[in-house]
Image (cartoon, rainbow, N blue to C red):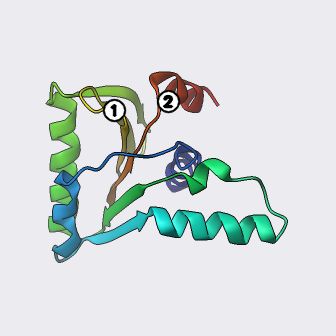
Amino acid sequence: MKRIFLAICIIACSFSMQAQNKIFSKYATMDGIDFVCINKAMFNLGTKFISAAGGEDLDKLGSLDKMLIISSENTDGKKRIDKDINALSTDDDYELLMTSHSSGGDNVFIFTNKRKPHELIIGTKEQNQSSMIVIIGNFTKEDVSNFLNQ
């Protein structure tokens, strides 16, 4: 399940980004939560190094503005993340694009914000860990559909 989550994260990075979401920044200072915020400058730097080393063309990655990665193996942190994933499922502003459940109890959810269509949220709930990746940018529903069909 972690490999699927990582693959989804890497593919989702290819969308161009432009918006911001401050809802999830509350996790930045919480104990028991791993929080990573990657801004545009870091994406630009990464694409230059990969291109210079003869790697793949990652032009779209260089156009990213922000990605938040939130994760916890801590019981309290996991409960907070699970609660927010569940809240997205019932929030009228969000549309559930994909759900995946495994027999081992692992769950993956992909949401988009109906009011801010430039936001993609990937949430995972596993036995010992929960995570969310918030990708903010300027991508269309067709981009999301193409991503999900790959």
Q: Is residue 143 left or right of residue 137?
A: right
Viewer-side residue, 85 vs 56: 56
Give neighbour class at mark 2: few <14, some 14-19, many 20+ (Cα, 10 Å).
Answer: some
Helix, strand or loop at mark 2? helix
Viewer-side residue, 62 vs 86: 62
Tell me if label 1 and label 2 are in contact, CB under 8 Å.
yes
Q: Quadrant of residue 86?
A: top left
Q: Is residue 9 left or right of residue 53?
A: left
Q: Is residue 103 above or below residue 25?
A: above
Viewer-side residue, 135 vs 18: 18
Q: Is residue 57 above or below residue 111?
A: below
Distance (Cα) linking label 1 and label 2: 9 Å
Q: Is residue 48 above or below residue 7?
A: below
Give neighbour class at mark 1: few <14, some 14-19, many 20+ (Cα, 10 Å).
Answer: many
- What is the three-letter code of the residue carrying label 1? Thr
N-terminal of the pair, mark 1 or mark 2, is 1
Image quadrant in which the C terminus is located? top right
Q: Residue at x 37, y 61 (%)?
A: 69
Q: Which residue is mark 1?
A: 112
The numbered disc on residue 144 is 2
Q: Residue at x 58, y 64 (%)?
A: 44
Q: Residue 101, how many percent across, how many down?
A: 40, 35
- What is the three-letter code of the residue carrying label 2? Val
Q: Residue at x 50, y 55 (%)?
A: 2
Viewer-side residue, 87 vs 46: 46
